[in-house]
Amino acid sequence: MRKRDELDYQATPDELTQLKYNVKHINRPNNQGVASVMGRDKDWVRCMREKLREEK
């Protein structure tokens, strides 16, 4: 069985745009807060934020 960190999460370009917006506009954003706003799992948010950091 794989660990949660090893799961391959996917996101559409619209979801990534929404994630960037939410991280920028939420006061002191954390993964749980962004996940609740977006209706996603906090591990998905963490993984997508890491992918966004890698793109820079």
Image: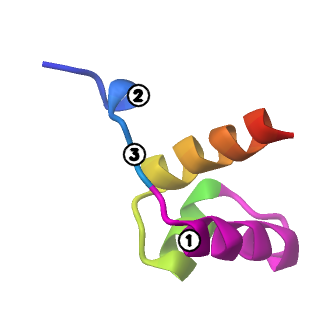
Q: Is residue 38 above or below residue 9?
A: below
Could you tell me which residue is drawn at 54 percent across and 55 percent down? 45
Is residue 9 located in the magenta-colored stretch of the structure?
Answer: no
Where disc 1 sits, the SS reads: helix
Left or right of 36 on screen, residue 3: left
Q: Secondary structure at mark 2?
A: helix
Which labelled disc corresponds to residue 5?
A: 2
- Residue at image position (47%, 59%) is 11
The tag on residue 15 is 1
Main secondary structure type of the part rendered in magenta = helix
Q: Which residue is mark 3?
A: 9
**Camera-nearest residue between 44 and 15:** 15
Between tags 3 and 2, which lies in front? 3
Give the CA distance from mark 3 to mark 2.
10 Å
| Secondary structure of residue under mark 3 | loop
Q: Tell me where residue 38 appears, x and y as whole percent.
A: 52, 77
Amino acid type shown at disc 1:
Glu
Q: Which mark is residue 1?
A: none
The quadrant in which residue 9 appears is top left
Label 1, residues with CA under 10 Å away: few <14, some 14-19, many ≥20 = few
| Mark 1 or mark 3: whose residue is earlier in sequence | 3
Q: Which residues fall within the magenta stretch?
A: 11-30
